[in-house]
């Protein structure tokens, strides 16, 4: 069970029921549970979508796409079955916030699914939870069964004359399955190879039917938006970046934990106030702002940043998944780049050449480099290889591998130079890298 | 006789009805079958292929994609050490080395008595509670060498019961 942490600057919306036993349906009901869906049942589908649009809620899975707009893309006049698909694959390194939601407030996710269904005219929702989270699958199974027993799911929910079903599903270990089209393949019982777009899932998704795919936290925010009104949620954050979100502080930080803070919160305060600063009197070197797929920030950049989508977007960068990883001044950036690349190389599904071959060559080059076998031309080669993937891969995983790599080479070139000509790693002369074997698609 | 228990088989039959195609529930079926048998045996694969009206090759194709699925027996307790970034920054690699020497096995190896197997894994969603290890489905977090020693000892005595 994940420990809970708290800080006075937190605004608890999505996390307000954490630690209160709300996984039990009776407790959930005492804490305003299932009120939002009853309110939504009195609203038209356009009203629901407009409320979510007014909230400025943007996808919490990483890309930050406006949720209300995504829902409005689902065609109204279709005879095909429509689906809601909850993305609970949570595997982006540094990210551990869907876990407490599923653990402490599973019914909020179910409510969010039903409301999304009412908004787009879907009658079925699937909750896909990564295979490693078995205890959360069990919590979700019980929550769904309890909701059926109360008549909140199934036929004629809340006596409204409307039907809605929610199913649980689990993965079996694969980062790439978090990518929305690969997620659909996995739910259909296949390898998680992404699909080409267009058509987008909102038009052609699961089994050919229009499908809304949203992150766990996105959908868990929706009942609160319906109850408090979109505008109030929007007002927590800066313009176009509505609400609060769960930030997962990890790495070299005194008080790691998952904290719910308004969008736009200053990263500097997040590190030094909320997170209690860097341990052992060390200094900040770098910050991974939102999972390993984002551009890595230097300490100077980090101290200027506001944690909202547009502050990053303006720089051509990404806020990402909420996984804020703090690196102190004793961290070797070459080693860090290597560990990140090992991950992407391991998780590449192998479907397209830029990602499959590019991540493999980058891993090989970075391994040699970190072990002291680097040549000066390798530094440019690493960047050249990463840029060769960027924008050329079949799905965004390739970009995700390239982005941190490019930012690390650009910003910490001096550390690469320190590793040249057989010199041992300046940060750890006894450095030993544990080799992950090449498995999977290779 | 089916290679999996009747109870599990019936559970699959029921769940399969929730999907518009026969193979919809395949990935969870593979994982739950592995939980019961310890691994995905030839017999189990043939059974699930028949059940989903796929060829065995199609089922094996799916299996090879997912990192949790194994076609060979693992240890009774599968020790999965995360060394991804948040764990690495807080000593995940040291935990892995410690487990290797304590168990006397390497990555993806099993102890001679079959009690433990070891695997270095990618992020398991415990980054704010790093370094973290998952043993079968149980999370062990905020670890030190001493803490993981105790945890492994507990599993070892459980195995003897
Ligand atoms: C390689 C890759 C992995 C992803 N993993 C996840 C994930 O684990 N969870 C998630 O919600 N979104 C993940 N995404 C983003 C999804 O593709 C998708 O944008 C998201 O689920 C949409 O939901 P949202 O709009 O509510 O954020 C991933 C994307 C990529 C490219
Ligand atoms: S970018 Fe990587 S993960 Fe995505 S399709 Fe290509 S090989 Fe597969
Ligand atoms: S990096 Fe180890 S659990 Fe996320």
Image: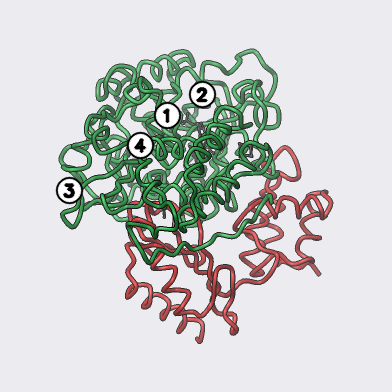
Chain colours: A green, B red
Which residue in the protein does label 3 denote?
Answer: A276
Chain letter for the residue marked with disc 3 in the picture: A
Which residue in the protein does label 2 denote?
Answer: A118
Q: Which mark is residue A411?
A: 4
Of B53 and B154, nearer the camera is B154
Residue at image location 26% in from the left, 35% down from the top: A302
Residue at image location 29% in from the left, 37% down from the top: A298
Image coords of residue A154 (percent x, y): 56, 36
Whether residue A164 can be seen here: no
Between disc 2 and disc 3, whose residue precedes?
Answer: 2
- The quarter holding residue A324 reads top left
Which circle, 1 or 4, is nearer the viewer?
4
- Residue at mark 2 to residue at mark 4: CA–CA distance: 47 Å
- Residue at mark 1 to residue at mark 2: CA–CA distance: 9 Å
Image coords of residue A440 (percent x, y): 66, 53
- Residue at mark 1 to residue at mark 4: CA–CA distance: 48 Å
- Residue at mark 2 to residue at mark 3: CA–CA distance: 43 Å
Give the class, few, some or many, for how many residues have Cα within 10 Å of label 3's Cα (few <14, many ≥20).
some
Whether residue A410 can be seen here: yes
Q: Is residue A122 left or right of residue B123?
A: right
The local secondary structure at tag 3 comes to loop
Whether tag 1 and tag 2 are in contact, CB under 8 A, the answer is yes
């Amino acid at each position: 069970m994940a420990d809970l942490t708290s800080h006075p600057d937190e605004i608890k919306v999505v996390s307000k029921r954490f630690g209160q036993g709300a996984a039990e349906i009776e407790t959930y009901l005492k804490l305003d549970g299932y009120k939002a869906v009853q309110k939504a049942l009195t609203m038209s589908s356009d009203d629901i979508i407009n409320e979510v649009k007014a909230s400025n809620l943007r996808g919490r899975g990483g890309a930050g796409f406006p949720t209300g707009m995504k829902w409005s893309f689902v065609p109204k006049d279709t005879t095909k079955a429509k689906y809601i698909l909850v993305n609970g694959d949570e595997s982006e390194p540094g990210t551990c916030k869907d876990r407490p939601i599923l653990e402490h407030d599973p019914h909020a996710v179910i409510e969010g699914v039903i409301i999304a269904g009412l908004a787009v005219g879907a009658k079925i929702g699937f909750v896909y939870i990564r295979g490693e989270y078995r205890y959360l699958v069990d919590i979700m199974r019980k929550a769904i069964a309890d909701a059926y027993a109360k008549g909140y799911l199934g036929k004629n929910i809340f006596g409204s004359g409307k039907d809605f079903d929610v199913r649980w599903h689990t993965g079996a270990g694969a980062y790439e399955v978090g990518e929305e089209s690969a997620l659909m393949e996995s739910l259909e019982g296949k390898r998680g190879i992404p699909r080409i777009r267009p058509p987008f899932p909102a038009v052609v998704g699961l089994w050919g039917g229009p499908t809304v795919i949203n992150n766990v936290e996105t959908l868990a925010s929706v009942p609160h938006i319906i109850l408090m009104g979109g505008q109030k949620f929007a007002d927590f954050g800066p313009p176009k970046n509505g609400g609060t979100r769960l930030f997962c502080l990890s790495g070299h930080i005194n008080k790691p934990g998952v904290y719910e803070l308004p969008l736009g919160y200053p990263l500097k305060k997040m590190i030094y106030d909320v997170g209690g600063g860097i341990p052992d009197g060390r200094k900040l070197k770098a910050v991974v702002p939102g999972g390993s797929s984002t551009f890595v920030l230097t300490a100077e950049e980090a101290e200027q940043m506001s944690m909202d989508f547009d502050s990053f977007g303006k720089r051509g960068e990404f806020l990402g998944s909420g996984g804020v990883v703090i690196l102190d001044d004793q961290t070797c950036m070459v080693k860090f780049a290597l560990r990140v690349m090992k991950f992407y190389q391991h998780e590449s599904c192998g479907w397209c050449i830029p990602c499959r071959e590019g991540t493999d060559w980058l891993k090989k080059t970075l391994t040699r480099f970190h072990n002291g076998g680097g040549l000066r031309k390798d530094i440019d080669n690493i960047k050249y290889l990463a840029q060769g993937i960027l924008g050329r891969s079949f799905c965004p995983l390739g970009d995700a591998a390239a982005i941190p790599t490019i930012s690390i080479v650009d910003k910490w070139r001096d550390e690469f130079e320190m590793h040249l000509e057989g010199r041992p790693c300046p940060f750890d002369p006894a450095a030993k890298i544990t080799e992950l074997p090449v498995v999977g698609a290779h | 006789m089916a290679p999996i228990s009747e109870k599990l088989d019936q559970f699959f039959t029921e769940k399969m009805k929730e999907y518009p195609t026969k193979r919809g529930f395949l990935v969870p079926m593979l994982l739950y079958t592995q939980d019961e048998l310890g691994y995905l045996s030839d017999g189990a694969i043939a059974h699930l292929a028949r059940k989903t009206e796929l060829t065995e090759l199609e089922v094996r194709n799916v299996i090879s994609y997912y990192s949790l699925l194994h076609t060979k027996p693992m240890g009774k307790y599968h020790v999965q050490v995360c060394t991804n970034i948040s764990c690495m920054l807080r000593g995940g690699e040291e935990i892995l080395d410690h487990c290797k020497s304590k168990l006397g096995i390497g990555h993806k190896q099993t102890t001679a008595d079959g009690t433990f197997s070891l695997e270095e894994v990618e992020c398991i969603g415990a980054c704010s509670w790093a370094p973290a290890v998952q043993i079968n489905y149980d999370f062990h977090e905020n670890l030190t060498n001493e803490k993981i020693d105790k945890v492994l000892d507990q599993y070892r005595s459980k195995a003897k019961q």
